[in-house]
Image (cartoon, helix red, strand yellow):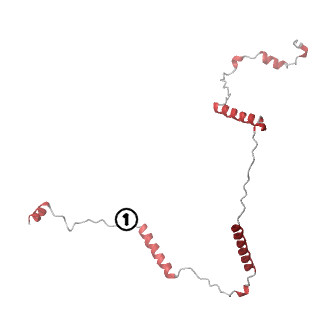
Amino acid sequence: MSSPSLKDLPKVAFDLKNQLEGFNPDNMKKADTNEKIILPTAEDVKRERQHNDLIHGVNNFSADKLKRTDTLEKVILPNAQDVAAEKTQKAITEALIEGVGGFDTNKLKHTETQEKNPLPDKTVIEAEKEQQQLIAGIENFDTAKLKPTVTEEKNPLPTKEVIAEEKKA
């Protein structure tokens, strides 16, 4: 294979050619290169290998390796008591539906509904207000309004001498 001739090469503009020839690599800034190749972890490789083995096993599965089996289906038929109980239940249900469907509403008595007023009377409301005021008074009590007091003992304890004299007597 021969190199292309000069006339076959692409032409470069004169000013670009001058810039390329006058390029000085010392004028470039220094930069650190960081390779960002992220290798898979051992766990990722193991998981991928398990997945590939599973796919390979499914694709290469041979149905000739299977054994023929016969399935026995056991059908338990209801006995005479179960059939009789179901028939009586069905008869009761039909009788109830017929009784509801054939009910005569003219046999009902007419009733008047009475609405009761569950609101409390004035005395209950006033008693509740008084209790709320009492609770508010206790909660908002200002202890700064209290007068200072001095406590005096009116029944002092006996001294050791008095106790000794009582023991002797």
**Is 43 in front, or is 165?**
43
Quadrant showing the C terminus: bottom left
**Is 20 in front, or is 156?**
156
**Residue located at (69% from left, 34% from top):** 50
**Is 71 in front, or is 135?**
71
**Residue located at (69% from left, 20% from top):** 28
**Residue located at (64% from left, 30% from top):** 42
The answer to whether residue 154 is above or below residue 40 is below
x, y (%) of residue 54?
A: 72, 36
Q: Quadrant of residue 30?
A: top right
Relative to 4, is 59 on the left or the right? Answer: left
Relative to 130, is 3 on the left or the right? Answer: right
The answer to whether residue 117 is above or below residue 55 is below
**Residue located at (43% from left, 67% from top):** 139
Mark 1, other Cα within 10 Å: few <14 / some 14–19 / many ≥20: few
Q: Amino acid at mark 1?
A: Thr
Q: Which residue is mark 1?
A: 143
x, y (%) of residue 35?
A: 67, 26
